[in-house]
Amino acid sequence: MTKKSQNTFWFIFVMSILLFGIGMIIWTVKKSVSVPVHESNNYMLTYQTTDMTINEILKLQKMFDKHYTIELKNVKELKLPAKYQNVYAKRSLQNPIELKDGNNSFSYSITQKDGNVVPTAQVDFLLTRPHTRVDD
């Protein structure tokens, strides 16, 4: 191999590595821009509102839990196998409820800790799918 062809080889090699790197950067940016951002709606609030008022929310939740119990009736809870459970979660999650194709219904009761039912309670439920808000 002559000196000139060796220089040409290294020039082409370095340029191809640079072009490949630039191409991967462009591909990464295009892929990340094309994926939509799904906002969290925990506590039926936006992420920003939840973040600003989380201490108040948790305090009110603790007060509510001290006095009342919400029980869903006529539902079948799914018991997830251990490999599908998030053992590293910072807060415990309830088991998901089985829903079938078509119409689903359930009832609930709100009781005080002393056992008295609260018949006039107003409750809002939000049925969601994990990782998306498309059908909320």
Image (tube, rainbow, N blue to C red):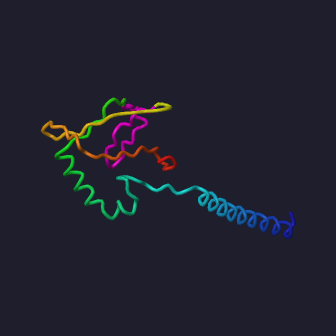
Tell me where residue 47 appears, x and y as whole percent.
40, 59
Tell me where residue 28 appears, x and y as whole percent.
62, 59
Task: Please identify the dominant SS of the magenta region.
Answer: loop
State which quadrant residue 106 falls in. Answer: top left
State which quadrant residue 13 falls in. Answer: bottom right
- Seen in the image, is 47 located left or right of residue 4? left
**Which residue is outermost to the front?**
120
Query: How many numbered badges does the structure rendering display?
Result: 0
Rendered-image quadrant of the N terminus: bottom right
Viewer-closest of 12 and 104 = 104
Instruction: State the extent of the magenta-drawn residues as a range.
Output: 77-99
Viewer-closest of 65 and 26 = 65
Residue 9, above or below 77: below
Tell me where residue 110 appears, x and y as whole percent.
23, 40
The answer to if 96 sits in the magenta stretch is yes
- Seen in the image, is 109 located left or right of residue 84? left
Viewer-closest of 105 and 19 = 105
Tell me where residue 91 appears, x and y as whole percent.
31, 48
Q: Which residue is pictured at 52% across the width and 49% down the height?
A: 134
Residue 114, above or below 31: above
Viewer-closest of 56 and 71 = 71
- Seen in the image, is 49 located left or right of residue 7? left
Q: Which residue is pictured at 26% across the width and 40% down the height?
A: 70
The answer to if 13 sits in the magenta stretch is no
- Seen in the image, is 122 located left or right of residue 21? left
Q: Which residue is pictured at 50% across the width and 46% down the height?
A: 135
State which quadrant residue 117 falls in. Answer: top left
Residue 130, above or below 109: below
